[in-house]
Amino acid sequence: MTEPAQSRIGVTGLAVMGANLARNIARRGVPVAVHNRTAARTKEFVEAYGDEGTFHGAESLEDFVAALERPRRIIVMVKAGAPVDGVISDLTPLLDEGDIIIDAGNSHFPDTKRRTEECAANGLRFMGIGVSGGEEGALLGPSIMPGGDPAAYAEVEEVLTSIAAVVDGTPCCVHVGPDGAGHYVKMVHNGIEYADIQLIAEAYDLLTHVAGLDAPAIAAIFEEWNTGDLESFLIEITAKVLAKTDERTGGPLVDVILDQAGQKGTGTWTAIDALDLGVPLTGITEAVFARGLSALRSERKAASTVLAGPNPSAAENRTDLVEDIRQALYASKVVAYAQGFAQMRAASQANDWNLDLGAMATIWRGGCIIRAQFLNRIRDAYEEHRGTAAGGVGEGSDIENLLMVPYFTEAVANAQDAWRRVVITATEQGVAIPAFASSLSYYDAYRRERGPANLIQGLRDFFGAHTYKRIDAEGSFHTRWAQDGTEVRTDA
Ligand code: 6PG
């Protein structure tokens, strides 16, 4: 017997993220239809959580679709890639014009753009929404980055804002932009997450191998750091991970965890996209490479006995080393965010998304993995510079680079001596700090009015007649380097 269509929203895909999102929605008093490819999972879900709200456990996709109010709103929470296309093609014949399919997984934004068009051709509205906060966030309040048609968003806004994290009375959910914009912003969020984590790992490495501290001592340092400028979820959980005792050995758990980082691809997508856009995204990209290098475990093991390190290997005893590392971490973090926001700005222009970057900082303040006090400063910066060209920033409400906002200009200026000392010490001691060092190099390159690319242009022109421009004359030029040495104007 068909029950009346009474569920306001549906969730298909009941692995932990989908299950927790469904529970979060139902706990707000919204009736939810739930479905999973294997019906046994749906049954288990309803048995386990049925008393948390009003659920319709659907055994088939037909039953699931029939249980939904119109326009139907269906959240798809399956593995990114082919499974998403599979669900869309299974759902399409069952849906009616105007129904809304919402992909809440970590999909790649070009796929979201394509799916938006494909669904539109079938009369369906497709939304790609970024959801951050892991399992706990999905259940208790994630940060939500919805992309897609604004009219479709209006149909789900109430539900999405009601389940999102809330900071200072503001839900961490705002319509990001059309088609792939939501998944794009989530991708950059993840890239920044990679940079944040890498910087923390580098600080841990220095505290271990240069300052000579053990995991519990470093845990205490991170706990302390979490009370200042660095206050954030990732710093907080770093203290917890470092403080954890291993049940088997009785020593710190972190000491027996294999030093080989996994990755599911969003960091790589962010770096590739930055290369495509021509945006220097050194911090995030170094973080992705560092995970790649960590995976070369057997090569590293062999190299560790062959490749020589520096001689001054004794632990540094500088009393200010810990504070220097804190400042280096903070300055490098500012650079990583400046780069990530510059990338979103470039993507917004390239795709005509009109992203409100201040709003992105606002919805990342709570619920998500990179949530941090620091994001309030970024939010304030966009707010303060809205409609102005003050502080050396670009036109209108546009901030070309967060480093040019006085708050961050000053923060990095104050930290730079410590930052440089840390990079020198790490280099002398042979500790790899790709994200610290590349962030500092970015800072040094960005603040130079004249860099060394004049020579790059000279070389390109020498071997390939690629031409160059002059600082003292209009036009493009080529020098006959290997012939008579004369210069010719090539665009006249
Ligand atoms: C989040 C996380 C989440 C996931 C990352 C992990 O915002 O909730 O970013 O999406 O934990 O994708 O990525 P890696 O497995 O690549 O580290």
Image (spheres, rainbow, N blue to C red):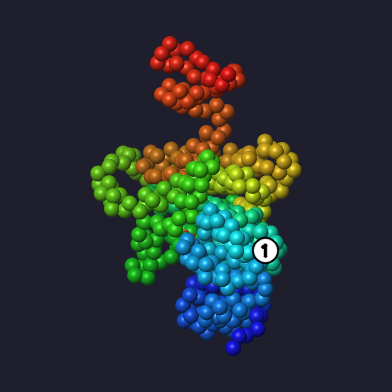
Q: Nearer the viewer, residue 121 or 185?
A: 121
Residue 17 seen from this side: no
Left-right relation of 320 to 385: left
Q: Label 1 sits on what residue type?
A: Ala
Return the x and y of residue 50 as percentages of the image width and height: 57, 83
Residue at coordinates 56% horizontally, 71% vertically from top-left? 93
Residue at coordinates 38% horizontally, 45% vertically from top-left? 431
Q: Nearer the viewer, residue 123 or 175?
A: 123
Return the x and y of residue 311 as percentages of the image width and height: 31, 39
Q: Nearer the viewer, residue 203 or 286?
A: 286
Return the x and y of residue 271 as percentages of the image width and height: 48, 47
Residue at coordinates 33% horizontally, 51% vertically from top-left? 296
| Outermost residue to the bottom | 1
Left-right relation of 38 to 250: right
Q: Which residue is mark 1?
A: 152
The correct choice, above or below, for 9 with respect to 189 in the image is below
- 10 Å neighbourhood of mark 1: few (<14), some, or many (≥20)? many
Left-right relation of 168 to 104: right
